[in-house]
Image (cartoon, rainbow, N blue to C red):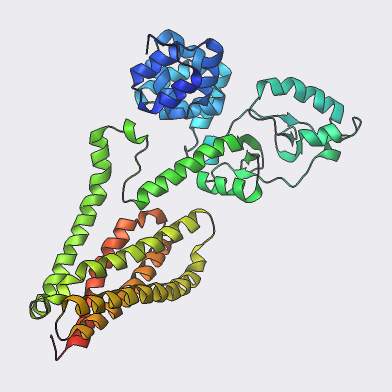
Amino acid sequence: MAEKNFTPSELYEAWPILSTEERVEGFEVLERKNADDFFLQLNARDRAELILGLPAGERRLWMRLLAPDDAADLIQEAPAEEREGLLALLDDATRREVKGLLDYAEDDAGGLMNTRYSRLRADMTVDEAISYLRRDARAREKTVYYAYVVDVEERLLGVVSFRDLIVASGEKLVREVMRTEVISAPEDLDQEALSQLFMRHHLMMVPVVDAQGRIKGIVSVDDIVDVVQEEATEDIQKLGGVETLQGPYLQVPLLRMIQKRAGWLAALFLGEMLTATAMGQFQAEIARAVVLALFVPLIISSGGNSGSQATTLVIRAMALGELRIRDWWRVMRREFITGLGLGTILASIGLARILVWQGLFNAYGEHYFLVAMTVALSLVGVVLWGSLIGSILPFILRGLGFDPASASAPFVATLVDVTGLVIYFTVAATILRGTLL
């Protein structure tokens, strides 16, 4: 790294695979104007790692380059023993703002907001407002979409866009131009709900207010993009039956990776042991009709796959706000019909396969048609059951106050595996009684 001066784009592309030492080395050879832009381009975790890798004398410069909300995010990502030292690098005014932000939960609107925003008084003229904002915007490059109109107690009265001010007559008062219907977020609003607020109303900025309607700060769309990515990553990892990694894959230590995956894997393994228990209950039937054992993987995998599909679709719809708890009955009706349809399709394929193999190889004996009907009807029942379980489980978890994404696809598949065996051998006992059983 030391022999070559990387461009910012080259360094950023290589960043995920570099060690901390290589990152620091590459960063320090950037030209100053490029280094500023590159540093601001990094996420909070990478900024924290980079600053802590720099010599102590250089850290103050980079900490003071950050807005209060970005500084707070960086400090939250740093190890607990380093946080006070990083906080001490800030100037007094910024330190007070950052401490105020750190009092909020990290995933609340208050913890995401920037306390520096453009504000106006209602009795200012448009010309006065434009003149003031022209000076003020130099310090607020990230937050120049709107200006918020407040009273002397900082209560939010309205919002005005820069466009509204430019096209208005200069003698008009701000109160005549502003919009009083302002979409705001309470300071304790969860970040996932906040991201949905942005998407639903197509906003660029949202003011954060306290219980008395006083504006505390703003959250911009730039901030919420990171939140959406973080929430999506957490949900996807949970759907795969993994605890949230809280870091890029290649940067998570191997021991922590094992810890994050072992819990769910052990729980799923214990669940799958119930499959062996269920098969033990039907070992007499299997002994009398060995052909039934041939189709066990086919039956349980089909049920698990249909359940995984259903739970994935429902969890994603919940995350996007398309489904709420009260919609559970509508979902169940849809999945009942869908499960029947999917089960019938798989049953037709399974039936055709058994009949063709019997015709070609005489593989299933004289009662092959009964075996085929057993498999076909079992597939309908297991796929239907998997669809219903996979769709209702996220609603149950949401109703109990848990994250619906905890209804991971492997968990649903394991649950359906056990019950699928019961369905399969129950159907077999009914159809094959007096022949193979």
Would residue 231 appear left or right of 292 to someone viewing this image? Answer: right
Look at the image and tell me whether residue 46 can be seen.
yes
Residue occupying the point 55% across, 45% down: 195
Residue pictured at 26% horizontal, 83% vertical: 373
Residue at the location (14% across, 89% down)? Answer: 435
- Viewer-proximal residue, 313 or 55? 313
Q: Please state the horizontal and vertical placement of residue 182, each as a whole percent of the image.
A: 71, 45
Kindly tell me whether residue 123 is visible in this rendering.
Answer: no
Asked which quadrant contains residue 53, the reply is top left
Give left or right: position of 275 versus 126: left
- Above or below: residue 78 compared with residue 179: above
Residue 28, image x, y percentages: 44, 11
- Quadrant occupied by the C terminus: bottom left
Q: Residue furthest bottom?
A: 434
Q: Nearer the viewer, residue 73 or 320?
A: 320
Which corner quadrant holds the N terminus? Answer: top left
